[in-house]
Amino acid sequence: MALYDVFGVGNALVDIQARVDDALLRELSLDKGIMTLVDDEQQSGVLSRLDGRPLNRCAGGSAANTIVALAEFGGSAGFIGKVGGDAIGEFFLKDMSDLGVSIQVTPADQPTGTCAVLITEDAQRTMLTNLAASTSLGPEDIDEHKIASSKYVYVEGYLLTGETTKAAAYKAFELAQKHNVKVAFTASDPFLVNLIRDEIWDLITGPVDLFFCNEEEAKSLTGETDALRCAVKIHEHCENVALTLGGKGSIVMHGGEEFPIEGVKVDAIDTTGAGDMYAGAMLYGITNGLDWRTSGHLASHAAARVVAQLGARLDRKFTKE
Ligand code: 26A
């Protein structure tokens, strides 16, 4: 009997969210809707520009959000990541464990990573990520027993951007295969697909049992212009595919069958974490006896709800800065 439905491996970040106007993005020379990597100094500079605005803080990181979603649905979930031995790191640990996530985090010498999430009127999120301690997650941090005790291991594509975090990801794949644990993987970001397209093909043809991607990532990966053709092409290589289409719903592929999942209409407030929530709800469904179509519906509804509120979680309680 598996102890955990899903064990996630990812960057442990604390999100600091603020609502901003387009003018501030222009002043900071930021392209709207994308993620930019920053260092300590740049992050402090951006955060100081947010002085006086209400800021919300919560444990973030893409895979961590997915794991939290799964825990919120009542699934048994665990997470492996790396924080610094600082107050922000403690905040991350407490925030995750309060939600019932079994967490295995080895403290690093660097400060805990942060993500400034700037939310504009049009519900888009622009992220500045200072990975800091997260970058030192390595293969030695991947606990074989935890992986072996799970139904699925969930790995974020973002890990493939760093040398040691990439080795950690491959260690997780290797241990999952050794113990017959399934692997779910998310493409994470269109920039990543452009950067390592061939490697992503190798992964989805190899260890990955369930692949999550959005429309932009799928198009970049396959070179197709039609979402369904993208899904079919990916499914030729990968057992299970969940391709999200934003407000238009999603396409789930399983066993040669295609399940189109219609979108759920909402007044969008903040798209942060919509894809993470989708993956969390989907993984909850398939590890708790729901079929693929039903899991897809659950995921679409959960993602729509998260878009209709601030932050990456359902019914979240914010901690004021
Ligand atoms: C390697 N990078 C850039 C990242 C991230 C990240 N999670 C992992 N690695 N940059 C931003 N995030 C997280 O994405 C979530 C929304 O999907 C943010 O913490 C945010 O909660």
Image (cartoon, grey):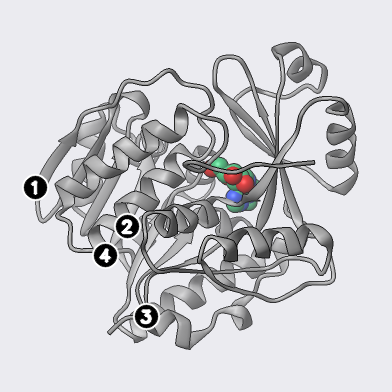
- Contact flag, marks 4 and 2 (Cβ < 8 Å): yes
Of circles 3 and 1, the one toward us is 3
Disc nearest the viewer among 1 and 2: 2
Spatial CA distance of label 3 from label 1 is 30 Å
Badge 3 vs badge 2, beta-carbon distance below 8 Å? no
Residues at badges 1 and 2 in contact (C-beta under 8 Å)? no
Identify the residue shown where x is 53% and y is 41%.
312
Badge 1 amino acid? Glu
Amino acid found under the numbered disc labelled 4: Thr
Circle 4 Cα neighbour tier, 10 Å, few/some/many (<14 / 14–19 / ≥20): some
Disc sitting over residue 3 in the figure: 3
- Residue 148, numbered label: none
What is the CA distance from the residue labelled 4 to the residue labelled 3? 12 Å
User: Callout 2: 10 Å neighbours few (<14), some, many (20+)?
Assistant: many
Residue 283 numbered tag: 2
Counting residues from the N terminus, which is met first, the one under dot 3 or under dot 1?
A: 3
Quarter of image, res 80 = bottom right
Instruction: Using the image, determine if residue 183 lies above or below residue 276.
Output: below
Is 31 in front, or is 54?
54
Amino acid at circle 3: Leu
Q: Is residue 275 above or below residue 106?
A: above
**Left or right of residue 110: residue 312:** left
Does dot 4 land on a helix, a strand or a loop?
A: helix
Q: Is 239 left or right of 319, judged from the image as shown?
A: left
- How many labels were placed on the picture? 4
Percent x, y for residue 294?
A: 17, 47
Looking at the picture, which amino acid does disc 2 mark? Leu
Q: Residue 287 carries which label?
A: 4
Q: Describe the element under mark 3 as helix, strand or loop.
A: loop
Can you tell which mark lies on residue 257? 1
The image quarter in which residue 284 lies: bottom left
